[in-house]
Amino acid sequence: MNSIEILYENDEILIINKPAQLAVQKGKNIKKSLIEVLEENMKKKVYPVHRLDMETSGCLIIAKNKKAASKHSKLFFD
């Protein structure tokens, strides 16, 4: 689980291939989340721009800072 496939990266975001059965964020009965794995690997805080259900695999946008998270969330949901 410590290896997450990065499909695209720039100064603001990562686009990753989220595997099924991996929660994006912490929650009840979640041993390790995607965000925790990324933060451990990158040694910095990251922010999900959107979410996918734990059972769902697919592309997920992760922002590298709060400003980028806000910017890309607006683009994603407008």
Image (tube, rainbow, N blue to C red):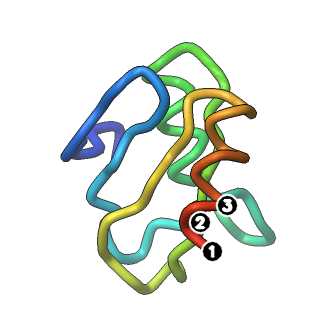
Relative placement, left or right, of 68 versus 22 is right
Residue drawn 51% across and 76% down?
52
Cα gap from disc 2 to disc 3, whole angstroms:
10 Å
Relative placement, left or right, of 55 versus 28 is left
Q: Which mark is residue 77?
A: 1
Can you tell which of label 2 and label 1 is closer to the viewer?
1
Pointer 2 with pointer 1, Cβ within 8 A? yes
Pointer 2 with pointer 3, Cβ within 8 A? no
Element marked by disc 1 = helix
- List x then y, in percent, for residue 5: 21, 45
- The answer to which quarter of the image holds residue 24 is bottom right
**Mark 2 residue type:** His
Pointer 3 with pointer 1, Cβ within 8 A? yes
Query: Which residue is under mark 2?
Result: 50
Q: Which badge, 2 or 1, is on the more N-terminal residue?
A: 2
- List x then y, in percent, for residue 28: 80, 71
Query: Which residue is under mark 3?
Result: 74
Q: Decide: is 69 above or below 19.
A: above
Element marked by disc 3 = helix
Relative placement, left or right, of 14 versus 6 is right
Residue drawn 59% across and 66% down?
50
Residue drawn 23% across and 40% down?
8
Element marked by disc 2 = loop
- List x then y, in percent, for residue 62: 50, 46
**Mark 1 residue type:** Phe
> Extreme right residue here?
28
Q: Decide: is 3 above or below 19.
A: above
Callout 3: 10 Å neighbours few (<14), some, many (20+)? few
Can you tell which of label 2 and label 3 is closer to the viewer?
3
**Mark 3 residue type:** Lys
